[in-house]
Image (cartoon, rainbow, N blue to C red):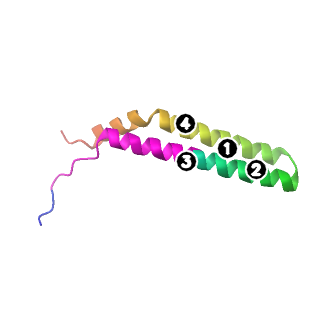
Amino acid sequence: MAAQKYQRPISPDLHAWGILFFAIIGMVLILVLGITLVNLYVASNGYNDLAAVFIALIVIGVLAMLALAFFAQRISVYYYRKRDPS
């Protein structure tokens, strides 16, 4: 078989759904693992400044995933236009 000279990039809608799925799964993982680890840390060491830092990192991670989910369509359209040779 001859190699293709041009391969059309993935459709923007499918790419956006992939980004959205990644963001939702990432957000759930950050929340579940983060809350579990903070609970274990607070149970063993008590609440202190480091626990507050861990909670702040959880909030920042969730906000980053929300931003990624919000801009998923725009990111995928930008990627599609950047890769489109026409």
From the image, tell me which residue sits under label 3.
26
**Residue in the image at 36% along x and 39% along y:** 76
The span from disc 2 to disc 1 (Cα, nearest Å) is 10 Å
Task: Choose the circle earlier in sequence order: 1 or 4.
Answer: 1
Q: According to the image, label 1 marks what residue?
A: 58
Q: Residue at x 83, y 44 (%)?
A: 49
Per the image, label 1 sits on a secondary structure element best described as helix
Tag 1: amino acid: Ile
Left or right: 61, with 69 as reference point: right
Q: Which residue is mark 2?
A: 38
Residue that mark 4 sits on: 66
Residue 72 numbered mark, or none: none
Residue found at x 86% / y 56%? 44
Q: Main secondary structure of the magenta part?
A: helix
Closest to the camera, between mark 1 and mark 3, is 3
Number of residues whose C-alpha sits closer than 10 Å to that of mark 3, classed few (under 14), some (14–19) or many (20 or more): some
Q: Which residues are magenta?
A: 5-27
Residue 25, horizontal then vertical, whole percent: 53, 47
**Quick one: quadrant of the N terminus?**
bottom left
Q: Amino acid at mark 2?
A: Val
